[in-house]
Image (cartoon, grey):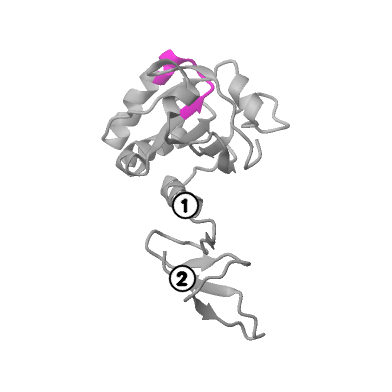
């Protein structure tokens, strides 16, 4: 997959919401692009259903979501009917047609060594400057946790606003953060290790 910190390429795409340029769709927002192996598959259905249920959360964070699957748009549109029945809500974001595997190959969302091309469960978090801020890559057999993706977005957006902090394990909004090594961190709560080292400096957001 493309490296964190590099610019994500723009694409002209055909989607369930019509043809569009990816960057035009993202606009000034953060972007979340997620890939899937195929339509009408069980794991993918549960994943998109969960993200459809989380739309208020992504909207609150100024994040534009789009999904990609290696099937044509007409199949996507039929599949959405199943997803909406399962999730109990609308699927308002576009699903991209990558029937020719062009995007999946270019950004590295595929698994090497398979007899048949298959898109992995990839996630790209793209900031408003079009830089890749995080990637997630799962094999086709394992579903992702989109609640964790929301948590990741919170951490990325917080640290983008303040480059003197980092987030500890499992950090959630409202929790303490850590002062980055080399930064002053005045008033931080220091947790000394048994060795006497004091680089664990916690502070409120």
Mark with earlier residue (1, 2): 1
x and y, in percent, of residue 100 in the image: 59, 15
Read off the residue under disc 2: 203
Read off the residue under disc 1: 161
x and y, in percent, of residue 66 in the image: 44, 30
In space, the residues marked 1 and 2 are separated at their CA atoms by 15 Å
Q: Secondary structure at mark 2?
A: strand
Q: Is residue 117 above or below residue 162?
A: above
Seen from the viewer's position, the closer of residues 92 and 193 is 193
The outermost residue toward the left is: 88
Magenta highlight on residue 68: yes
Seen from the viewer's position, the closer of residues 179 and 122 is 179
x and y, in percent, of residue 102 in the image: 61, 19
The N terminus, quarter of image: top right
Q: Is residue 143 above or below residue 116?
A: below
Q: Is residue 27 above or below residue 151?
A: above
**Residue drawn at the location 63% of the way across and 29% of the way down:** 107
Mark 1 surroundings within 10 Å by alpha-carbon count, few (fewer than 14), some (14 through 19), many (20 or more)? few
**Residue drawn at the location 50% of the way across and 17% of the way down:** 13
Magenta highlight on residue 124: no
């Amino acid at each position: 997959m493309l490296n964190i910190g590099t610019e994500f390429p723009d694409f002209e795409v055909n989607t369930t919401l019509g043809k569009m340029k990816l960057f035009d769709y993202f606009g000034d927002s953060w972007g979340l692009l997620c890939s899937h192996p195929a339509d009408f598959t069980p794991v993918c259905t549960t994943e998109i259903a969960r993200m459809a249920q989380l739309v208020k959360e992504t909207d609150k964070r100024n994040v534009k979501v789009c999904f990609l699957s290696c099937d044509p748009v007409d199949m996507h549109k039929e599949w959405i009917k199943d997803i909406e029945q399962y999730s109990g809500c609308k699927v308002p974001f576009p699903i991209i047609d990558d029937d020719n595997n062009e995007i999946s190959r270019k950004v590295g969302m595929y698994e090497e060594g398979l007899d048949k091309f298959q898109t992995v469960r990839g996630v790209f978090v793209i900031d408003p400057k079009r830089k890749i801020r995080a990637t997630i890559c799962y094999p086709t057999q394992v579903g992702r946790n989109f609640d964790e993706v929301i948590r990741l977005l919170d951490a990325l957006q917080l640290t983008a606003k303040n480059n003197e902090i980092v987030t500890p394990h499992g950090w959630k909004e409202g929790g303490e953060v850590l002062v980055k090594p080399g930064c002053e961190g005045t008033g931080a709560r220091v947790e000394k290790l048994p060795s006497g080292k004091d680089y664990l400096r916690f502070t409120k957001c």
